[in-house]
Image: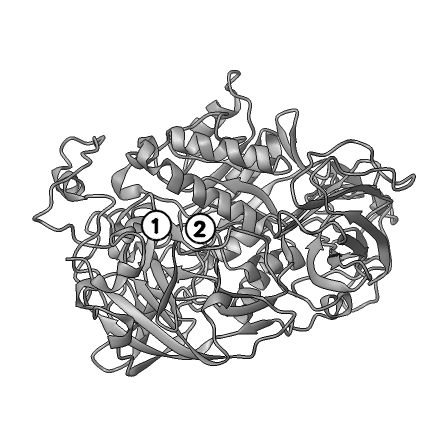
Amino acid sequence: MIASIFQGFHRQDDYQNQHVTQIGREPAHARWQAWPDEQTALSGRQSPNRVNLDGIWRFAYYDRIADLPSSVAAIVCNQSITVPGNWELQGFGHPVYTNVLYPFQPDRDEPYLIKPSLRDPEDRGHQRIMERYHPPFIPQQTACGVYQRTLSYTPDADDDAVFLQFDGVEAAFYLFINRQPVGYSQDSKLAATFQIAPYLQPGENEITVIVLRFADGTWLEDQDYFHLSGIFRSVWLIRKPAFHIRDYQLTAKWLPSGDGELIARCQVNRRSGFADQRMRLQLFDPNGRICLDLERPIDRTAPIYGMGSGMSRRAVTPLPQTATFQMTVDQVMAWTCDRPVLYTAVFSLLDQDDHVIDCESSAVGFRTIEIRDHVIRLNDRRVIFRGVNRHEFAWPTGRTVSTEHMVAEIRLMKQHNFNAVRTSHYPDDDRWYDLCDQYGLLVVCETNLETHGLAGALTNDPEWSAAMLERARRMVLQHKNHPSIISWSLGNESGYGPNHAAMAGWIRQYDPSRLVQYENNDPGAIASDIRCTMYPPVDLLLRMIGNPHDQRPIVLVEYAYQITNSGGGFEQMMQLAEKYELFQGGFIWDWQDKCLPARNENGSTYFGFGGDFGEDLVDWINPVFMCANGVVLPDLTPKPCATEFRQGQAPLLIDLMDEATGPFLQTLATDSPLHAAVRERDEAAQACFQGLDDLVGRIGKELKPCEPKLAAQKKLFLAEQTRGYKTQQAK
């Protein structure tokens, strides 16, 4: 039986219908800060129009959806829970770790709809399980949690648009305001925003959120991790004027001339009635100096050009309800992972009296990612991806990760010479991308899509095409303005079919400034700009490099699997990346052990694997300790293999060519300018090296010492040479 509490929505079984992925949810958009004015946007302070609702909420837990009362009014939330957080880590239900299997037992009395073929016909155990899988339906024993809190609201004459935004809820949820149905959403790793002004009353208001442990969207979220539930990211109350900025897009390219090309679009929410309004765009450099201050009308027709000698006159596609800016910025400081220079763009919606109606801002990094001559280039230079796969995970708190924990992760990554991260296997919290922008990490942003337990059945099923495309589309729309993101991934281990091809087509048309990639079942150039094979042996990798029929660049989406005492032989891969231009590195699996706090009979806490929490399902296809395959332990302590990676992927290598007199042969894979000196024991630095100014980005550059001969005991010291601008560096 389906609980009658959901009868206020247009179908009772929305959460078991892949064609209903949302009800009443706002279209996806870039992050709203809702600044009241330009000064506040530049101040770095929290916007007064964006209120955080994290904290203690009232809570009720139900073992089955069918146990819910027939109305919201009958729900009694007499327990408490911390938001954000996973309810399994707060005493409700059990976490479930799976790698291949879905995190629930199929109902034995339901027929199967999908009977996928398996490579191994003898694997009857796995096949029997798969034959009982019944997408889009979920088991009757699906738990749910009810969250409630009160909200004080004072109407404002100039404030007619009030939104409630959930940054992450797993797996699906219904929203009620004052017991009235507002909306429904799924896709647990993207923000969901709802307009709630029509449901609010002056004074106290009651928010009710019913979260389902599983829904039809779970069939698209079969990732290798602990499956957890609840409101695990922040909740925000956002107030905007009735006429406001709805979305904005910034594409900032670095040009070989040293100039930057900026294309900016800012869309308002109305389809009419904006004839007297204009949009202002201001661009500030890293030191807060203004570079641009332009205004444009909001128009349905072709955008207006002719803004001066610095203006590029190549037309861009006009969009409705949108102000469009296109210009050249003279001699910009480029964004790279070694020097992540950020500008700030501020959009201001102006009325006829030049008063600011609404204001949004974004960091801007001028960088160009492209494939030229079969090689991925960042700002015209070949890049080697010294990358790692990262789940959004913290061992004491599960899927809820603090900013401090994220910064600690990035510092460790930088200290171990990682320059890239793949967000396996879903989009991360906006704060992670902010930090990658700030500290300089190249990001592969991945769609929240994995159907490992069903192989490729759903990507070849047209009944699932809209749900899959929506996940990719919303990911791009939400995270499009982060310069650290250089590639969009179509998901992980989901087979390959026309649904993936549709995802790739939409992304390429909307955002041609980035790469598109996908690994599973070798989709070819239709869906992937690169060959991102998993775990190839060296002989296969060499055959791929030499394949004359496919010369796309190679970046391994996963390799060097860090299980038990692995990690050896890594340096050979880096040597191949230095030797063959077509092979450009990859992403180690993975960053952090995904364990949860468990207690033994003595009450001591230890790193818990799958099966340590009393759960009723354990993935027997793979060992339960496969959650522990990171470069660092759950508490971020580096494992011994971390030292191997730090040395093996060091961006600067120096080889002695002549032991008596030098010179040295250096290989430099960094954009950081250097200075060098030698010293003996505790002496001050004495001798410099010639030709340091042109070392950046060079491979095989001869480095000659000023001294004709260096004593054997003298040591070479290299340090980063800083310029006259601020950069954010991990220490």
Q: Residue at x 66, y 24 (%)?
A: 373
Question: What residue is shown with label 2?
Answer: 426
Q: Is residue 569 visible?
A: no
Considering depth in this image, is 606 or 235 the residue closer to the camera?
235
Query: Which of the 4 image quarters holds residue 727?
Result: bottom right
- The kind of secondary structure element at disc 1 is loop
Residue at label 1? 223
> Residue 562: where, in percent of width, then height?
40, 51
Q: Residue furthest left?
A: 109
Judge whether 228 appears above or below 52 on screen: above
The percent position of residue 359, horizontal first and vertical second, equals 70, 61
Marks 1 and 2 close (CB-CB < 8 Å)? yes
Q: Quadrant of the C terminus?
A: bottom right
**Frontmost residue, 195 versus 523:** 195
Q: Which residue extends farthest right?
A: 309
Q: Is residue 439 above or below residue 180?
A: above
Q: Regarding mark 2 in the picture, which secondary structure is present there? A: loop
Mark closest to the chain's N terminus, 1 or 2? 1
Is residue 169 among the parts visible in the rendering?
A: yes
Mark 1 and mark 2: Cα distance apart in space? 9 Å
User: As shown in the figure, which amino acid type bears the numbered disc 2?
Assistant: Tyr
Q: How is the image coloured?
A: one colour
Q: Which of the labelled discs sits on residue 609, or is there none?
A: none
Mark 1 crowd level (few <14, some 14–19, many ≥20, 10 Å Cα): many
355 displayed left or right of 398: right
Residue positioned 62% across, 69% down in the render = 159
Q: Position of residue 469 (x, y in %)?
A: 43, 39
- Image point 35% across, 61% down: which residue? 173
Pick whichever, 520 or 460, lies toward us: 460
Which residue in the rendered view is the most extreme toward the top?
Answer: 549
With respect to residue 556, does 103 lie above or below? below
